[in-house]
Amino acid sequence: MGLHPVGIIGTGKYVPERILTNQQLEQMVETNDEWIVTRTGIKERRMAAEAEATSDLAYEAAKQAIAAAGVTAEDLDLIIVSTITPDMFFPSTACLLQTKLGATKAAAFDLSAACSGFIYGLATATNMIATGMYNHVLVVGAETLSRITDYTDRNTCILFGDGAGAVVLGQVEEGRGFRSFELGADGSGGELLKVGGGGSRMPSSEHSIATKQHFIHMAGNDVFKFAVRIMGSAAEDALAKAGLAKEDVDLLIPHQANIRIIQSALNRLNLPEEKAMINLDKYGNMSAASIPVALAEAVEQNRVKEGDTLVFVGFGGGLTWGASVLVW
Ligand SMILES: CC(C)(COP(=O)(O)OP(=O)(O)OC[C@H]1O[C@@H](n2cnc3c(N)ncnc32)[C@H](O)[C@@H]1OP(=O)(O)O)[C@@H](O)C(=O)NCCC(=O)NCCS
């Protein structure tokens, strides 16, 4: 892609200590472990401590990624934080992270594409490095979804968790790095998954709080159908753009929303389950953090080797989707 090949040169992750299990959820809403496991594959998820916000999670993941890349915070030219749960409206979480890291030479901005945010961030950073504008870009997916989840709504509260994953992107040798990106959006489906309150359309008020507009609202079934359709097709399109076939895939790193959605993508791509990184049983859906945390764990577990072909694919609110092919 472009003049310089661009790849991931360091990964990191952080998840909060506190665990919320299916058994604990049984005490909170009318649900049960068996329903949650068979319908979603999720067994537990992490919850940020009271004093922890998104930039704190991002900071821990970013420090690891910077160290793994063998660079320092001063080497960063840009910080992108993909999140739908920023610490506050502004300053951006990326600016809060920039000062925590001491990344004094880095520009910084947040990117809003919900669960597809990390792939959107990779595409943005890759192009900036490929064209020679920047050398090192930190891309973080970080969320504290527990802060916008209604723990009296069994349709949503079983799904989401908190965490952060980070990567440093830089130039890599010929033959390695990102081969393609496939990004998309369909704003007509925006109503299916949203937090409607607290913005300029419906500023926070007693009414917005009373009607729970500060929480996630989701039409689960419609999102499910969209996800099943788009995960397979986005991954296929990214592979076609890269000039590669399904058989070339060594590891699929999908968004971790629901095991049944991942299985349908695997079927479409003719891949066995061993070729997918799956950790949603431990963390649930961490939105923009799911894919980078799964990648960091795949690296920790030595599941990616030099020359391997990786496919990232995700979907989410917006509606949005994204897929990418990377030679490690
Ligand atoms: C949410 C989701 C797990 C629900 O699974 P589903 O198989 O579609 O289930 P349905 O919504 O059809 O609900 C089936 C029944 O289970 C009930 N149910 C919903 N949540 C429940 C829970 N936590 N425990 C027990 N029962 C539950 C429903 O009320 C419904 O009951 P009814 O038939 O009496 O009305 C699934 O739709 C999904 O994963 N959607 C995608 C969500 C997603 O990925 N969002 C984030 C995008 S990034």
Image (cartoon, grey):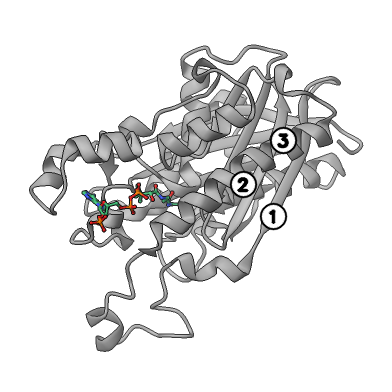
In the image, taking residue 93 as reference, residue 5 lies left or right, namely right
Looking at the image, do the residues carrying marks 1 and 2 touch, with CB atoms under 8 Å apart?
Answer: yes
Eye-nearest disc, 1 or 2: 2
Residue at 71 percent of width and 23 percent of height: 246
Q: Which residue is mark 1?
A: 184
SS at circle 2: helix
Q: Which residue is mark 2?
A: 230
Is residue 165 visible to us here?
Answer: no
In the image, taking residue 283 as reference, residue 210 lies left or right, namely left
Residue at 40 percent of width and 29 percent of height: 279
Residue 272's image quarter? top right
In the image, taking residue 263 as reference, residue 42 lies left or right, namely left
Q: Amino acid at mark 1?
A: Gly
Residue closest to the far left: 27
Crowding at dot 2, Cα within 10 Å, few <14 / some 14-19 / many 20+, comes out as many
Crowding at dot 3, Cα within 10 Å, few <14 / some 14-19 / many 20+, comes out as many
SS at circle 1: strand
Q: Which disc is residue 139 wearing?
A: none
x and y, in percent, of residue 63 in the image: 48, 35
- Looking at the rendered image, the quarter that the N terminus falls into is top right
Cα distance between the residues tagged 1 and 3 = 14 Å
Q: Which residue is mark 3?
A: 236
